[in-house]
Amino acid sequence: MTTNRVANLLRKRESPQRPTFLELFFDLVYVFALTRIVHELVLDYTRGHVAETLSTSLSENGETLLLLLALWSIWTQTAWTTSRFDPFQPAIQVVVVATMLGSLFLAVAISGALASTGMLFAGTYTAIQVGRTLFFVLTLRGHGLRRVNMLALVWFAASAVPWLVGAFAPELTRNLLWALAVAIDYLGARLGWPVPGLGRSRVSPWAVAGEHLAERYWQLVIVALGETILTSGSSLLRGPIVAERTLALTLSFLTTVLLWRIYFYRAGQILGEAIAASANPGRLGRSAEFSHLLMVTGVVVTSAGSELLLMDPTGHAKPAWVSAILGGPALYLAGRSLFEYVAFARVSRPRPIGILVLLAIAPLMVGRPPLGVAAAAAVVLLGVAVSDAIRAHGRPLEQASPPR
């Protein structure tokens, strides 16, 4: 009876691998969560002296991006859950919806997570990770995946200590403890949750549901791009709708379209095929995951840059503002370069050239109108997109050829 109950929870290999409406519903919370992250980044760039200096801005941004890494961990673990288990089963739906509610509380707590709502953020994060994993430990009796969750539970319990202690600590100590907690969670997942005397997990979700996970990651990219449109449109409404700000919105929209085009040009369409063709789908899947983390972070920083642009399109761009407007696209191109390597075992030259150009022009853009800085970023991205179109013109669609 127990074996049959567990078997019913698992996703069948012959089942459709497309994400379900439940998973798309789950992603709605992350539109809000990413909006809160962008809001915090903008505050980092505009809070007093932080707006004037790049080094202090990077320090403040690091604190906010730490929260993004926590959100990413929750989202990724949920994607893995729905890849291994049948999301049409009521028990799995309860897990996903409960995680969705917890993610909503995390998003609400972001604005004060580094101060007044630190305990809400840390407590909710640990409750999701520990609670969800404990549920599967209790549910999967007699199945091999129970051991995987038992190992993961040890690591999540270990990371809960710095998460919860850090919530009550002074700022510097809290940041260090939370960075340690995030490192524990990411390192545990990367190493297979090794526990002395129990070994480690060698089960990779990419090996069994690469197509499903591939689609989940490109859906998250769409969510992130949608957040940029939401943020820039809302920013325009918070001030006079004049020619300069309208042009700023147009540039922001064009940048978003170019990011979309660069992502989905071939590699974005065949990740599932690349994973299936790989001799080591687990390793390739981890590379795909990291590339998407870089791209989503790049989109979030670009979104913050768009909001700064709409605040003062004709003023004088401070170093920190330039780092957002140009650094977001550069980080995105870095993730996209790694993503291309995952699919084709190579990186086309326009992407690293685009990164180098963005970095090279950054010092020249300090003090210039943000409109000019945003236009320069859009021109670089347009160059990458046009080079893709030229390369593809008149040629058959390139097939996946992942690294061996």
Image (cartoon, rainbow, N blue to C red):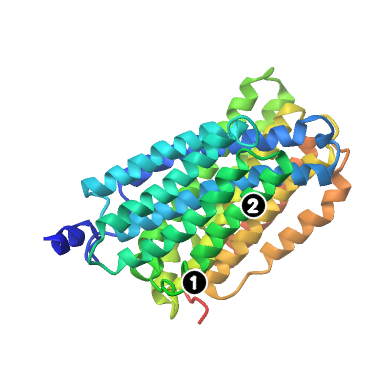
Q: Where is residue 321 in the image (x, y as percent from the top left)?
A: 78, 39
Classify mark 2: residues with Cα within 10 Å, few (<14), some (14-19) or many (20+).
many
**Who's the residue at 43% across and 38% down the image?**
102
Residue 115 figure quarter: top right
**Who's the residue at 87% across and 49% down the image?**
363
Tell which of 372 and 289 is nearer to you. Answer: 289
Classify mark 1: residues with Cα within 10 Å, few (<14), some (14-19) or many (20+).
many
Residue 215 appears in the figure: yes
Check the picture and name the quadrant holding the N terminus.
bottom left
Residue at numbered disc 2: 179
Q: Position of residue 393 (x, y in %)?
A: 55, 65
Determine whether the residue tagged by mark 1 lies in a helix, strand or loop. helix
Residue 369 appears in the figure: no
Q: Position of residue 302 (x, y in %)?
A: 66, 43
Residue at numbered disc 1: 284
Tell which of 75 and 311 is nearer to you. Answer: 75
Residue most toward the left? 1
Determine whether the residue tagged by mark 2 lies in a helix, strand or loop. helix
